Amino acid sequence: MAKDFDPHRLDVRRFAEDGAELAASDSLQSFRRLAAETQQPGDAAPVQWRARGELLNPRHVHPEVWVHLEAETVLPLVCQRCLNPVDVPVNVDRSFRFVSDEATAAAEDDASEEDLLAVSRSFDLVELVEDELLMELPVAPRHEVCPEAVKMSAADPDFEAAEAEREHPFAVLGRLKTGK
Ligand SMILES: [Zn+2]
């Protein structure tokens, strides 16, 4: 299916005319700008993405050229509250209408609800995937509930009582050290 479409040099109009689809699972490291924002991208989940072309109003003199894009991955980031690693799922689900050139895209952009791009015979779809994922990057990534740190505020009696009920902090620490 769609072997003749190169996601890095996509003929957008033909892609839409064919109602073609492209999908891939690319390593996070292959998205260099995105990888630069993450921790150890080499161990990260791949970026799964899928694009579908569509021609709307095909009988019209100027049919509309659309590309629908979905992408998802899990980004290894640093929690801004506890500074431990946090995996943040991100996903993109957007549709783009391609117009004849950049000037038209700029002129119509304010009046259009959809995202406009200039049509091209060698459009870099993978770069668009990266652009969109970068926009989804959280400014301050956080755990919903941060993992409990081993606290040392033993002077607090409430804290001690709570710890005694559960488990001594040094027992936890010992397990962490031995890796059990
Ligand atoms: Zn956290």
Image (cartoon, helix red, strand yellow):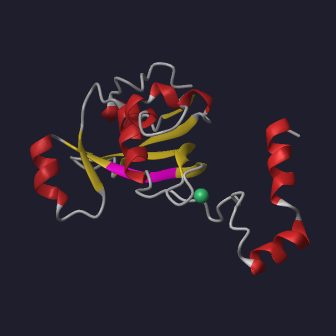
Q: Which residues are magenta?
A: 91-96
Residue 105 visible in this rendered orientation of the protein: yes
Ligand 1 is found in which quarter of the picture?
Answer: bottom right
The residue most toward the top is 4
Residue placed most toward the observer, 117 or 65: 117
Judge from the rendering whether residue 153 lies leftward or rightward of residue 126; answer left or right: right
Q: Is residue 20 above or below residue 65?
A: above
Quarter where residue 6 is shown: top left
Q: Residue 56: x and y, percent?
A: 36, 51
Q: Residue 103: x and y, percent?
A: 9, 45
Identify the residue at horizontal 54%, vertical 52% (top origin).
83
Judge from the rendering whether residue 90 lies leftward or rightward of residue 172; answer left or right: left
Q: Is residue 166 above or below residue 24?
A: below
Q: Residue 116: x and y, percent?
A: 25, 50
Residue placed most toward the observer, 116 or 39: 39
- The image shows a total of numbered marks equal to 0
Judge from the rendering whether residue 13 lies leftward or rightward of residue 19; answer left or right: left
Residue 67 visible in this rendered orientation of the protein: no
Image quadrant in which the N terminus is located: top right
Identify the residue at horizontal 41%, vertical 34% (top origin).
36
Q: Is residue 74 above or below residue 28?
A: below
Identify the residue at horizontal 57%, vertical 37% (top origin).
48
Q: Is residue 95 magenta?
A: yes
